[in-house]
Image (cartoon, grey):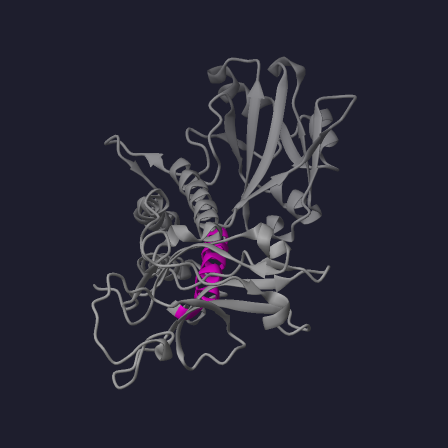
Amino acid sequence: MGLAHLWGVLTAVFDKDTLALGQLKANHLCVRFINGSLIDTDREDQLPPVLELATVLPADAQQATILLALPHTYANASNCLNPNEFSDCSESMAVARYAVSLRFDSMENEQYLTCPVARLLRDVQGNWAFDGQFVPPLLRLKENAGLIERLDRLLTQLRAKQARLMRMRRESNERMADFASPDMLPFWLLNVLNSYEPVFRNFLMHADVHPELFYREAIKLASSLLIFSLDHDAGEIPLYQHDNLTAVLPPLFDLLSELLEISLPSQIVAIELKKSAQQQKWTGVFHDARLCEAADFYLSVHSSMLAHQLQIQFPLLCKAGAADEIIKMINQELAGIPLVALSHVPVARSLQPENQYFALDLAHPTAKPMLATGICAFYVPDVLGDIQLELFAVLRA
């Protein structure tokens, strides 16, 4: 598919020191106009004259878009800059140069072909400064440092989600990584991220591509991520406007970042356990109401005991239940919430190989008081060695 916009800025470098003195001076301009005319001041074209900002901008102006201007050519009139200095005689010319100038969007520009190249903003002291958020019509993505920085941050965010999803995969009997059957959302999300990570990595490594090419791939990623969002729709994807990229690419980066963030919300809720100073007792409070309604609870246990011994002994000796019943369980040797040793870490949790994992059987009657009060407790005797407990819940919805 071809490009619809073959004009714009290749390079636009201005003198910041001169701007501090109230003058606008270009150091290098390489711009292709919409009619195909190419201006390159590092080759045959001359730099435009320096502008005194105080004389060309209103005193109350707060911003101004800088335009590179090229006079229109006319088929039935002279196109020389100073026509009265010449006769009607024809003579060969060794060099013909474009008479470009710097103008502002607030001027009368009907007699010129123009291309925006930068924007000025007035700061609180009343001085002019270049607007780093402005994106002119570009022919190469790399010419805007802000866009490259946003692309780098987006790629970092994408890779973090990708790595998290990779950790959620299980190993099948055929030595192939897969997800558990209910986990279709992580599967499709990982498929999306794996498809676009190389694309965006290539854009970052070879950023001399046209922004329209980047836009096409970026909106494909946004469209794929919209599947996982209830709060956004396709109408929020900005349409491509080559002459107003400031309204296109930065909002698109914002949308992609937000969609990546909400596409994989954390299902894990960590529950802080406070250890009693007198005995091997831990207590935790469920601050999230969802934990009492639709969540599964797991213990991550680290001990000085051998792993296979811990898997057998811990469910037998640990008491789990409501905080106000745990003492009664200990004194009367009553059963608490059953603990089931797990061979695999819960899918939403990253594996800690040195830990053993146990699931709380919430179907047992002793689990009801814990869920009703929203306070849990665990008792572990000293015979199980130096124990560290982590309790976390995995939301079902």
User: For the point 42% across and 45% down, which residue is it?
Assistant: 155
Residue 240 seen by the camera? no
Identify the image quadrant of residue 318. top right
On screen, 16 above or below 241? above
Which quadrant of the figure contains the N terminus?
bottom left
Find residue 227 and report its horizontal and vertical position in percent. 39, 61
What is the total number of numbered labels drawn onto the structure image?
0
Viewer-proximal residue among 391 and 231: 231
Q: Is residue 255 part of the magenta span, yes or no?
A: yes
Please give left or right for residue 345 compared with residue 336 in the image: left
- Residue 292 drawn at (x, y percent): 62, 49
Q: Is residue 349 above or below residue 130?
A: above
Residue drawn at (59%, 56%) of the image = 19
Magenta segment boundaries in residue numbering: 243-263
Whether residue 131 sits left or right of residue 328 in the image: it is: left
Rendered image quadrant of residue 302: top right
Residue 234 position within the rendered picture, expressed as x and y whole percent measured from the top left = 40, 69
Q: Would residue 8 be seen by someone viewing this image from the given angle?
A: yes
Measured along the vertical axis of the image, is residue 175 above or below residue 181?
A: above
